[in-house]
Image: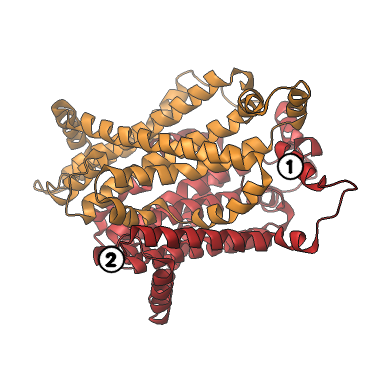
Amino acid sequence: MSSAAERQHAGPPQPSSLQTPVLQRELDATHTWQGPGGAKPSQITRWMSKRGVIAIRSFVIFIALWWLLALWVNRPVQLPSPLRVAIALGGLIAAGEVSENALISVSRLGISLVIAAVLAIPLGFLMGLRREAEAIIDPVVELLRPISGIAWIPLALFIFGVGDILPLFILVYVAFFQILLNTIAGVRNVDQRLIAAARTMGVGRWAVLRYVIIPAALPTVMVGIRLAFAAAWAAIIAAELIGAPSGLGFAIEWYRELLMSPKVFAFLVVIGIVGYFADLALRALQRWLTPWAQGTELA
Amino acid sequence: MIRPAPESRWTPVINAVLLPAVLVIAWQIWAVTLPADTRAPAPVGVVAAFFHLAGSGGLFSATLQSLGRVLLGFAFAVVFGVGLGLLMGSSRSVKDNLDPIIESFRPIAPMAVLPIAILLLGTGTPAALSIVAYAAFFPLLINTVHGVSRVDRKLVQAAMTMGVPRPRILATVILPAALPSIMLGARVAMGVAWTAIIAAELAVGAKSGGGTSGGIGQMMFVFYAYSIDLNGIVVCMIVIGVVALLIDRFFRATERWLMPWRY
């Protein structure tokens, strides 16, 4: 018992100056030692090294390379130029196809994350708090977990057919295990001394759960939800590509079959952007729900 | 803590078997109550299908084909992911310039890249390989960068003070110090790659009219679309799960063997 508490208090190693990136520092050093007397970097150099500027510059170079490659390959069906992709993207946005399919995919994702959370969080609390429950349920979890959600697609196609249920089933399945395992870990890692202290002061079981265990476990649960989102976002494209008549995964495959590759690439861009902003939204939710848990970021 | 009753040494075994056994038996009972011409899978049928498929050697060769693709794609990902990761971890300007591009590709799922891989490479093995390599690339890269950037710089300085040339520092100081992180990345990457190959084979089978891609994903699709053998599908699912588990155990064992100082 005491060793467990100690382990908890050891905590993750604090980033110290000793652990800052090695060669990175040397490189900085070589940069600042530009000339005798340590000439300060000019205005332009400083502006060029700003984060946003670097990002834009990288994108410009990337798009230029893509364009050159497209010109050199000169097979627009296989590798369309960035301009044609941008035009296709503009057309798709104007026609409302992007918002329609993105909305379908994102709402499927949202619904299935909510269903998975509703199923997995109470079960996780039960398994985290009660050893007997964990001993009995855990074998089933460990038997099913290695079978990836995607491997369920053929069987689910047979049971549900092509439609809305299939992607929801696959996503709930994928998200469930991530949330469950993180909930169990979060409940398990609550500082036992906090619970003991509350119990000593005569706090009831439910109050301990409400005011000690849930707040302490919630940050880990939120990490589980973000991991679940990442896994589900990868799975939704597969599920829609094979077994749904709508959504981003369906759209991208639809235009590939028609060999309209600028539109395929345009939807790829949309998938990247939507995925990025969905993760941003989840981070915001995480900060809002568990403001006391800053620093428990995903590695 | 005081345990209320002394546990028999069989208790853990009974606990582990209890719920799976109950579920399997319930499944079998449910299947027996269905009309005789049902296609619904049942435990007895699954076992029979397993012996049939394993006996004909088809299951084994399909699994081997999928595994071979995963290993080849994974090898590509190791070369690019770890190589680029070492570069990005040790040079800040490289990292700053490449990060925006890497981060904007990261939310694009491997399966979303599949249509483009099919456009560029056709429906054969190269498309499947590129999906696997793409899927495995990101965990490897990110964990390598993380591992290299956390190497104790006193070690590097000590080596430099003693006049060790840079390539040797990389090989004898930085790489071993970053190895735990790289191996973690490799384990995650291999799991993702195994999922990706199943998805790719399934989708190629589903979307190119049952092409000749082979592999266990393709086998599942054939069971779904042509022979409608749901017991066979369940056998494939179990095999996929077992392989995923073995891959995970293999990497954990390798970690222990490569880095005995951590265990």
Q: Secondary structure at mark 1?
A: helix
Is the N terminus of chain A in the top left, top right, bottom left or bottom right quadrant?
Answer: top right
Which chain, by letter, is red?
A: A
Chain whose colour in the figure is orange: B
Quick one: label 1 or label 2, which is nearer the N terminus?
1
To the question of a shared chain for discs 1 and 2, the answer is yes
Residue A197 percent across, percent down from the top left: 78, 41
A5 and B249: which one is in front? B249
The residue sitting at 17% across, 50% down in the picture is: B210
What crowding class fits label 2: few (fewer than 14 Cα within 10 Å), some (14-19), or many (20 or more)? some
Nearer the observer: mark 1 or 2; the answer is 1
Dot label at residue A257: none
Residue at x 59% of width, y 29% of height: B180
Q: What residue do we see at 38% from left, 32% from top? A: B18
Instruction: Looking at this view, name the residue that lies furthest to the bottom.
Output: A94
Q: Which mark is residue A254?
A: 2
Q: Which residue position holds label 1?
A: A27
Q: CA distance from mark 1 to mark 2?
A: 48 Å
Task: Provide the chain ID for the residue under circle 1.
Answer: A
Residue A87, image quadrant: bottom left
Answer with left or right where residue A47 lies relative to residue B254.
right
Left or right of B210 in this view: A293: right
Looking at the picture, does residue B238 appear above or below residue A169? above
Image check: A186 left or right of A87? right
Q: Mark 1 is on which residue type?
A: Leu
> SS for tag 2?
helix
Tell me if residue B59 can be seen: yes
Measured along the vertical axis of the image, is residue A252 above or below residue B250? below
What amino acid type should be assigned to the residue bearing mark 2? Trp
* Residue A169 appears in view: no
Instruction: Give residue B162's position: percent from left, percent from top.
Output: 77, 20
